[in-house]
């Protein structure tokens, strides 16, 4: 089961007795270590259902689940492999009642949150509401309540936002709803304030593995500590050199705290890279060198020296794009480089993609822009999700409003306003208010008829969804539902362009098929045998949908060139990478003038994160890397002189370097591990 693991990976996999931190450098096989450790824990007698592996994206969780299945077969289905937020949902669905949450609570999407905040803050401006949302999210990620925010407010703007946050939290409670940040902060509150629940989950989870640990924020770290308790059976896997999400709350303090909070922590470094050539790794090690080190490490590879890293300059953005396309075309002349998907163009910010899209189109090169609009952000999918949320949680007023008006069914905004006032005065949800005997005094008789019809439809759908089990039954139910509410006609009536309407209807069909498949009952091939997937009711599946942000697992492996921001490229790799726009003011990104009064320590931290971003870009490349910068670049409507990024000089490409022999490195590592083994077992020969 441990075949193919190197010595450091074996040490990480076999350390089962206490907490461990696995410092996994780029391309060092961290997912392999996590999945093999799951197998090792099961082999050592820990039941699969008592193992949790937590990561940050649904795509990463799906990949981990698939690879674990290849090692442990059907037991992989029992392991809790999910995101931090999905684990939070599990805790709240099971034990959230002690916080006043019903098991069928709703998870609000971005549109719902913006609408709520506009209402709470008395504004019609979406941008203002979104700025409040960002601030409130940052406060929640730092573990702050509305009371904390009000107490610590530094100016009138923050005091206003804290007051809006208090009203917003009241609405969430009334609607039996949570936002994305609550999926961490509420489980933290649950475990910290309720000892019996905490002990239950500590017993339930015998070992917790955390992937991408460097991306955790303060509340996620506190949640991890409560989940593992004093026994501290956990494995944190991460890389301080790849911490690039400080702007959304991730903090390297979590790495600093581990040895302090867990003195028995075992630190294991994975430094052998299986992705890149030595020339690429040397440039990466040189770039990251100036950053302060929590745990020093140096990546190395036995894949050979490879081609030198190339640096080129360009007259402007269009010239840079043309050169990038020519490089891709020239590399493809070689028979080994026929696939378009072997190439990626990486940049610092989304707006930089436009010139490359134009050049690729002109050359008739197929491409995709990574990190585009999420499937679940499309209006038609949000419409259907609102209906589904209402089936699960009748108290979800934002979902009620959207479902009641999409498609139109004679319930207008005047009626909804009257219903909302009535519900508020009697402290009811809008759905509960539908069947109140007193409603006739607030709403017209004709409007009540439409409201009752809608209420009966929701009750009927909820009952049928609860008793609809398996993918075939779910597909039939969903098709009938769309037909009954006239959703296809709604799309065509509201789109002037028939092709756009058809594309949106195609998205709807994809979505309902995707939902139906998750109801199970389909044959799956696992560990050499055919197993029927677990059958679930449609209502059970619908409960999880609001948490999912992308249908990435639906995507086929397209043979196209990838255009991507550096942030979106993390965790990915390509044989050939072109890193563009590597200029001062772009990478590293220039601080806004409004931030120029930041203390020197904060500016230094920003620069260190930008250097880590460059490091991430370099280490995406397997075989070749080209870095380009602009002699002149656009700044607003002007063209200004460009300077090469300081990171280009830091790569040390013009320095004479002593090339390390990987055989000597392996020899030294074997000697080091033999010495450690002797120290831990001095009686052995």
Image: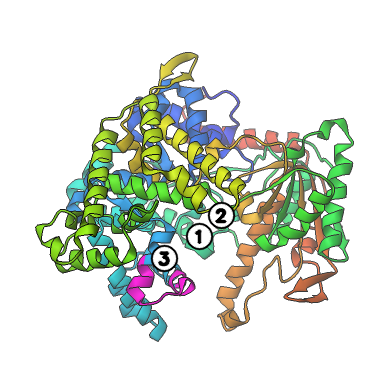
Q: Would you identify the image quadrant in which residue 144 lies?
A: bottom left
Task: Decide which of 41, 364 is in the foreground and name it.
Answer: 364
Q: Which residue is mark 3?
A: 114
User: Within 10 Å of the Cα at label 3, are there few (<14), some (14-19), or many (20+) other Cα atoms?
Assistant: many
Instruction: Let me know if residue 123 is in the magenta part.
Output: yes
- Pointer 3 or 2: first along the chain: 3
**Residue at the disc numbered 1:** 252
Q: Which residues are magenta?
A: 116-131
Residue 618, given in percent of the width and then of the height, sits at 72, 51
Q: Distance between the Cα atoms at labels 1 and 3? A: 30 Å
Question: In the rendered view, would you say 486 is above or below 565?
Answer: above
Q: Earlier in the sequence, mark 1 or mark 3?
A: 3
Residue closest to the far front: 446
Q: Nearest to the eye among marks 1 and 3: give it.
A: 3
Q: Could you tell me residue 326's position as x and y percent?
A: 88, 48
Residue 573 lies in the magenta-colored region: no
Q: Residue furthest bottom?
A: 156
Q: Which residue is mark 2?
A: 240
Q: Is residue 538 left or right of residue 604?
A: left
Residue 125 % position (x, y): 45, 74
CB within 8 Å, label 1 to label 3: no
The color scheme shown is rainbow
- Does the image show residue 84? no
The residue at the point 59 percent across, 59 percent down is 293
Residue found 30% across the figure and 30% down from its top? 468
Q: Secondary structure at mark 2?
A: helix
What SS does tag 3 mark? helix
Given residues 277 and 137, the one toward you in this image is: 137
- Measure how far apart labels 2 and 1 are at the Cα level: 7 Å
Q: Is residue 320 left or right of residue 191?
A: right
């Amino acid at each position: 089961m441990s075949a193919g693991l190197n010595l450091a990976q074996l040490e990480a996999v076999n350390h089962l007795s206490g907490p461990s931190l696995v410092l996994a450098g780029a391309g060092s096989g961290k997912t392999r270590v996590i999945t093999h450790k799951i197998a090792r824990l099961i082999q050592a007698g820990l039941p699969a259902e008592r193992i949790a592996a937590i990561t940050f994206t649904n795509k990463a969780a799906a990949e981990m689940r698939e690879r674990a299945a290849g090692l442990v077969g059907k037991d992989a289905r029992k392991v809790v492999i999910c995101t931090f937020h999905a684990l939070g949902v599990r805790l709240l669905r099971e034990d959230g009642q002690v916080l006043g949450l019903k098991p069928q609570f709703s998870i609000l999407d971005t549109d719902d949150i913006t609408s709520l905040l506009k209402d709470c803050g008395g504004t019609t401006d979406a941008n203002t509401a979104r700025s409040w949302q960002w601030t409130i999210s940052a406060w929640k990620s730092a573990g702050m309540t509305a009371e904390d925010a009000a107490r610590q407010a530094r100016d009138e703007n923050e005091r206003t936002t804290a007051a809006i946050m208090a009203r917003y939290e009241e609405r969430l409670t009334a609607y039996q709803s949570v936002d994305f940040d609550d999926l961490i902060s509420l489980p933290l509150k649950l475990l910290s304030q309720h000892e019996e629940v905490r002990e239950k989950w500590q017993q339930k989870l015998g070992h917790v593995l955390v992937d991408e640990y460097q991306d955790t924020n303060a509340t996620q770290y506190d949640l991890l500590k409560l989940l593992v308790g004093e026994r501290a059976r956990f494995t944190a896997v991460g890389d301080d050199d790849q911490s690039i999400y400080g702007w959304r709350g991730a903090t390297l303090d979590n790495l600093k705290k581990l040895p302090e909070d867990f003195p028995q922590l075992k630190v294991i470094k994975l430094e052998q890279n299986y992705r890149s050539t030595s020339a690429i790794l040397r440039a990466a090690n040189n770039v990251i060198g100036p950053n302060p080190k929590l745990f020093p490490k140096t990546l190395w590879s036995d894949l050979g020296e490879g081609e030198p890293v190339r640096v080129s300059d360009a007259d402007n953005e269009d010239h840079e794009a043309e050169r990038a396309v020519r490089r891709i075309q020239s590399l493809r002349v070689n028979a080994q480089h026929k696939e378009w998907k072997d190439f990626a163009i990486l940049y610092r910010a989304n707006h930089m993609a436009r010139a490359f899209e134009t050049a690729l189109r002109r050359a008739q090169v197929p491409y995709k822009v990574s990190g585009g609009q999420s499937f679940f952000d499309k209006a038609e999918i949000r419409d259907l999700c609102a209906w589904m949320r209402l089936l699960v949680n009748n108290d979800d007023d934002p979902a009620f409003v959207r479902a009641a008006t999409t498609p139109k069914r004679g319930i207008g905004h005047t009626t909804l306003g009257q219903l909302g006032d009535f519900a508020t005065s009697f402290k009811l949800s809008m759905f509960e208010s539908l069947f109140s005997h007193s409603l006739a005094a607030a709403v017209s008789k004709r409007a009540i008829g439409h409201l009752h019809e809608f209420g009966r439809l929701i009750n009927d759908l909820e009952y049928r969804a609860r008793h609809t089990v398996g993918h075939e039954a779910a597909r039939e139910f969903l098709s009938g539902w769309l037909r009954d509410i006239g959703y296809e006609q709604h799309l065509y009536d509201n789109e002037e362009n028939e092709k756009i309407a058809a594309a949106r209807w195609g998205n709807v069909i994809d979505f309902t098929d995707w939902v139906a498949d998750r109801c199970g009952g389909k044959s799956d091939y696992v560990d050499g045998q055919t197993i029927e997937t677990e059958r679930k009711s449609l209502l059970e599946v619908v409960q999880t949908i609001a948490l999912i942000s992308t249908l990435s697992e639906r995507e086929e492996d397209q043979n196209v060139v990838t255009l991507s921001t550096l942030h979106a490229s993390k965790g990915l790799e390509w044989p050939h990478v072109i890193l563009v726009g590597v200029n001062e003011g772009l990478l590293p990104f220039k601080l806004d003038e409004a931030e120029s009064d930041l203390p020197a320590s904060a500016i230094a931290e920003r620069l260190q994160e930008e250097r880590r971003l460059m490091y991430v870009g370099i280490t995406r490349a397997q075989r070749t890397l080209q870095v380009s910068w602009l002699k002149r670049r656009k700044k607003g409507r002007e063209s200004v002189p460009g300077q090469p990024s300081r990171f280009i000089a830091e790569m040390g490409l013009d320095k004479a370097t002593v090339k390390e022999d990987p055989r000597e490195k392996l020899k030294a590592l074997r000697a080091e591990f033999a010495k450690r083994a002797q120290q831990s077992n001095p009686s052995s020969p």
